[in-house]
Image: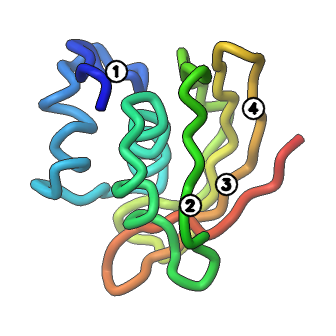
């Protein structure tokens, strides 16, 4: 497993261990759909497949995740959010994620499952 970064890959200025790292370790849950989106981007960046699977809705979750060794996730840009607050049961996050081979533009859908935010699916642009 790659070395954990000092600064969180999600774009906050916080240390990884205090930001998305605490979600990856199971010490906290995402309070909003955007926070889950950021933690999932960070999980791709640090190659944490277990967290990605755990934070995926069981109805749409793949059996495995392929994390290509040569692909580095570099930066996340949140473009828009709708609903997804601590008081909602669903939400969307539009983002652009930059990686070593280009970028991904997606509108992701999130829902609450058993009280926790999970990734449902998304539409790529």
Helix, strand, or loop for circle 4?
strand
- Residue bearing the label numbered 2: 83
Choose the circle earlier in sequence order: 4 or 2.
2
Image position of 88 with respect to 24: above or below: below
Camera-side residue of 114 and 68: 68
- 23 left or right of 66? left
- Residue bearing the label numbered 4: 104
Choose the circle earlier in sequence order: 2 or 1.
1
The residue located at (62%, 48%) in the rendering is 93
Camera-side residue of 54 and 108: 54
**The disc label shown at residue 106, or none:** none
Question: Please, which colouring scheme is shown?
Answer: rainbow
Q: Circle 3: is it few (<14), some (14-19), or many (20+) Cα within 10 Å?
A: many
* Closer to the eye: label 2 or 1: 1
Report x, y in % for residue 94.
69, 42
The answer to whether the residues at label 3 and label 1 have Cβ atoms under 8 Å apart is no
Helix, strand, or loop for circle 1?
loop
**The disc label shown at residue 108, or none:** 3
Helix, strand, or loop for circle 3?
strand
The answer to whether the residues at label 2 and label 1 have Cβ atoms under 8 Å apart is no
């Amino acid at each position: 497993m790659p070395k954990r970064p000092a600064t969180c890959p999600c774009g906050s200025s916080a240390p990884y261990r205090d930001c998305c790292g605490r979600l990856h370790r199971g010490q906290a849950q995402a309070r909003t759909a955007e926070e889950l989106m950021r933690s999932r981007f960070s999980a791709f960046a640090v190659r944490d497949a277990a967290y990605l699977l755990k934070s995926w809705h069981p109805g749409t979750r793949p059996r495995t995740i392929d994390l290509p060794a040569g692909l580095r996730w570099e930066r996340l840009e949140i473009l828009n959010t709708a609903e997804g607050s601590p008081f909602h049961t669903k939400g969307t996050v539009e983002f652009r994620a930059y990686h070593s081979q280009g970028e991904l533009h997606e509108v992701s859908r999130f829902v609450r499952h058993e009280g926790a935010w999970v990734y449902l699916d998304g539409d790529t642009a």
